[in-house]
């Protein structure tokens, strides 16, 4: 297996009040396009008498977690755990992006109702009190700025739940950018510069097929607006779920927007993607270097080629989640959760959509649902 020249880098630093804290012995950082906030857990232990006083880091302090000087999480410290035993001291710290507050706090905006607005405006209004900037990807501008006839905050729901429900109206996603902001759109616009290849840079690879969150039929109900309005309904079936497992979904928007059929297809594709995943482990937090330049970090949302004959895959996948890991047992590694790009491109305005992956088995292209391979 080739050795990545970037492996000697991967330096993790936590900056608080201008002070940088490095030398962490155990690092775990998670970022993903299906989670609104990145999370981190860091720890260090020292044998007596190298470290007597705990590091002066306290919960609720603002922080920037960087890899080789590049921010990957910008937010707040959630918890600190100083301690000691008979042989030494320890200090653990964990935290999240600024958007972590959106997962904990209730959604509040004026009367809690929008009329003839857009998804972009709903997001901006909800994010304003938290001073979290919003970026819209190029393939989602049209959907994010299209009219939504009416949208209401449901009593007691969090900002995360409210935004997630609003995003489903336009079949878009929202995730943390690592710099303290959020991205609204669809992944896959950027390509990785390094392919994932069995026998070259893949340490391990594991497929997961799940059906516990999938259903035999998705039935979407809504109500048309205007005179003569009536209840409308449509459905799609998941051919991979053989037993009776129906799910009724109330359309998040009435009248305008996507049809119940489109909403049902979006639910089917999303649940297929979350149920079928490939986790690939590589040696470095960075991609391979090119032209003597440091390789870019592995980040969520990238379109990456995967070639792994053992699991019968040869084609493009989307990086849905990245986990940077460093400890004495595993060394410095990066876990990449890969998903079928078709689950994320249904409303893409990009004419150059990702090509479907192909199975090497018998030379036949695979179905969109990976579990059918």
Image (tube, helix red, strand yellow):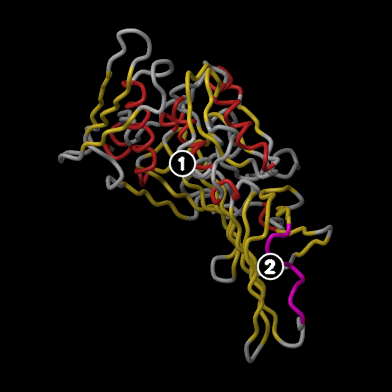
| Residue name at image x 47 percent, y 49 percent | 280
Picture coordinates of residue 321, whole percent (x, y):
51, 46
Front residue of 265 and 220: 220
Picture coordinates of residue 107, whole percent (x, y):
55, 41
Where disc 1 sits, the SS reads: loop
Toward the left, the furthest residue is 243
- Circle 1 crowding by C-alpha within 10 Å: few under 14, some 14–19, many from 20: few
Query: Would residue 147 be found to the left or right of residue 286 on screen?
Result: left
Picture coordinates of residue 228, whole percent (x, y):
30, 8
Quarter residue 134 falls in: top right
Which mark identifies residue 155?
A: 1
N-terminal of the pair, mark 2 or mark 1, is 2
- Circle 2 crowding by C-alpha within 10 Å: few under 14, some 14–19, many from 20: some
Task: Examine the residues drawn in magenta and state their main secondary structure.
Answer: loop
User: Magenta residues, as a range?
Assistant: 53-61
| Residue name at image x 70 percent, y 85 percent | 47
């Amino acid at each position: 297996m080739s050795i990545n020249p970037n492996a000697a880098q991967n330096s993790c630093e936590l900056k608080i009040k201008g002070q940088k804290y490095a030398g962490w012995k155990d690092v775990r950082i998670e970022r993903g396009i299906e989670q609104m906030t990145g999370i981190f857990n860091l720890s260090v232990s020292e044998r007596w008498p190298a470290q007597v006083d705990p590091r002066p880091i306290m919960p609720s302090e603002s922080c920037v977690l960087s890899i080789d000087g590049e921010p990957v999480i910008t937010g707040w410290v959630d918890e600190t755990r100083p301690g000691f035993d008979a042989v030494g001291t320890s200090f653990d710290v964990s935290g999240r992006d600024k958007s972590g507050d959106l997962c904990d706090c209730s959604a509040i905006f004026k009367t809690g109702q929008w009329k003839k607005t857009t998804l972009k405006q709903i997001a901006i209004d909800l994010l304003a009190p938290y001073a979290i900037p919003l970026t819209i990807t190029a393939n989602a501008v049209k959907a994010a700025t299209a009219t939504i006839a009416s949208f209401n905050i449901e009593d007691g729901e969090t900002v995360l739940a409210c935004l997630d429900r609003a995003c489903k109206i336009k079949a878009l996603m929202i995730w943390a950018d690592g710099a303290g902001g959020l991205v609204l759109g669809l992944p896959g616009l950027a390509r990785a510069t390094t392919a994932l290849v069995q026998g070259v840079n893949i340490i391990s690879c594991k497929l997961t097929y799940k059906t516990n969150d999938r259903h035999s039929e998705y039935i979407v109900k809504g109500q048309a607006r205007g005179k003569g309005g009536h209840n409308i309904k449509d459905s799609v079936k998941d051919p991979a779920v053989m037993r009776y497992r129906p799910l009724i979904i109330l359309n998040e928007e009435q009248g305008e927007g996507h049809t119940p059929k489109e909403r049902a297809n979006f639910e089917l594709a999303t649940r297929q993607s979350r149920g079928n995943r490939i986790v690939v482990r590589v040696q470095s937090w960075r991609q391979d270097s090119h032209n003597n330049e440091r390789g870019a970090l592995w980040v969520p949302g990238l379109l990456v080629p995967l070639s792994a004959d053992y699991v019968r895959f040869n084609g493009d996948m989307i990086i849905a989640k990245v986990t940077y890991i460093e400890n004495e047992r595993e060394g410095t590694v990066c876990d990449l959760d890969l998903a079928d790009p078709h689950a994320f491109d249904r409303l893409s305005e990009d004419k150059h959509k990702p090509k479907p992956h192909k199975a090497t088995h018998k030379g036949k292209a695979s179905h969109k649902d990976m579990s059918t391979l």
